[in-house]
Image: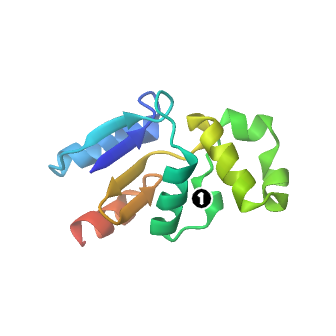
């Protein structure tokens, strides 16, 4: 299991605490220090079944500063993947990878259902 996060992010801290409280062991990867590649993002997107927009950190400073809420709908998929891979802070976090499972953003109920079958 790989937990991709930004260590200073409060949501990532909550997700880490939840994983630890449930007894999961995982490898942690700092999304700012080791941003995902376009290839990784494409694979995670495919496995997640989520719309590509869900991979953007829409509340982040970079997203807002670049006015992406208006630009994103006009962009092609390749351009969006390129933008996501350009800076780890552009990507919504945390991301949890476990075999075929890809969880983006922390919603405790969803994580419990997907990981614990609750």
Percent across and percent down for residue 76 are 77, 60
Q: In this view, does 36 lie to the left or right of 112?
A: right
Q: Which image quarter holds the C terminus?
A: bottom left
Q: In which quarter of the image is residue 72?
A: bottom right
In the rendered image of this protein, does residue 109 appear above or below residue 27? below
State whether residue 58 appears in this view. Answer: no
Using the image, determine if residue 80 lies above or below residue 61: below
Q: Can residue 16 be seen here?
A: yes
Could you tell me which secondary element the residue under label 1 belongs to? helix
- Label 1 belongs to which residue? 54
Query: Horizontally, is 98 left or right of 73 in the view?
Result: left
Give the percent coordinates (x, y) of residue 16: 31, 41
> Toward the viewer: 25 or 44?
44
- Based on the displayed image, in which of its 4 quarters is residue 103 positioned? bottom left
Could you classify mark 1 by the number of other residues whose Cα lies within 10 Å: few (under 14), some (14-19), or many (20 or more)?
few
Residue lying at the far front of the rendered structure:
39
Residue 39 lies, in percent from the top left, at 53, 52
Question: Measuring 34% from the left and 66% from the top, which residue is drawn there?
Answer: 100
Q: How many marks?
A: 1
For image coordinates 31% across by 68% down, the residue present is 114
Considering every residue shown, the one lying at the far left of the view is 23
In-image side of 10 versus 63 (left or right): left
Residue at image location 61% in from the left, 45% down from the top: 57
């Amino acid at each position: 299991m790989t937990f991709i996060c930004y260590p200073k992010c409060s949501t990532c801290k909550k997700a880490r605490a939840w994983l630890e409280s449930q007894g999961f062991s995982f490898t942690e990867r700092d999304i700012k220090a080791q941003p995902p590649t376009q290839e990784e993002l494409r694979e995670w997107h495919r496995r997640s079944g989520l719309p590509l927009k869900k991979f953007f950190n829409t509340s982040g400073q970079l997203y807002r500063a670049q006015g992406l809420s208006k630009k994103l709908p006009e962009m092609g998929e390749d351009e969006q993947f390129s933008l996501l891979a350009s800076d780890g802070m552009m990507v919504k976090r945390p991301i949890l990878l476990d075999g075929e499972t890809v969880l983006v953003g922390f919603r405790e109920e969803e994580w419990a259902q997907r990981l614990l079958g609750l």
